[in-house]
Image (cartoon, helix red, strand yellow):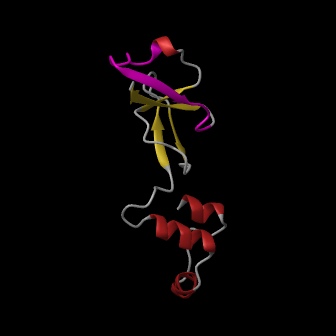
Amino acid sequence: MEMAKRHGIAPRMSEKEFAELNANPPAWLVQSRANRKAGARPVWVHLTCIVCGQDEYERPKKWWPNFDFVHCAIHSPAQLPALDSGKTRVEYQDISARMFGIVDEDGN
């Protein structure tokens, strides 16, 4: 719905308009439908700060690893969950307007 709104698709349309949209979908709609298939990356992900619970939605980037958690850029490392023994923490800055992604990797 958000993408339809963003691309100027009216919230209500006739059956004829809907059939035309399905018969000749714009590129963004084709992409969105392809992303819904099993195994595809989501179009939007919900990010929630592990410290304060602040949340936002963001389009995932191809280079994103699977984050163990995310946090707001305003929080210091001391506020984050403790790092398990034998792990190394990697921080991915600016994954959204105000969030950082964290991956705790094996320290080998």
Q: Quadrant of residue 98?
A: top right
Q: Is residue 25 above or below residue 96?
A: below
Q: Is residue 10 visible?
A: no
Q: Measured from the top left, where is residue 102 in percent x and y?
A: 47, 30
Residue at 53% x, 28% y: name it: 91
Q: Measured from the top left, where is residue 85 in percent x and y?
A: 32, 16
Q: Is residue 45 visible?
A: yes
Q: Measured from the top left, where is residue 83 in percent x and y?
A: 38, 18
Most frequent secondary structure within the magenta stretch: loop
Q: Residue furthest left?
A: 85
Q: Residue furthest front?
A: 108
Residue 75 located within the stretch drawn in magenta = no
Q: Is residue 79 above or below residue 25?
A: above
Residues rendered magenta in the picture: 79-96
Count of numbered circles on the image? 0
In the displayed structure image, the side of residue 27 where residue 32 appears, left or right: left
Q: Measured from the top left, where is residue 95 in percent x and y?
A: 58, 38
Residue at 63% x, 36% y: name it: 97
The quadrant of the image that shows the C terminus is top left
Residue 81 located within the stretch drawn in magenta = yes
Residue at 54% x, 18% y: name it: 75
Q: Residue furthest top?
A: 78
Of residues 1 and 42, the one nearer the viewer is: 42
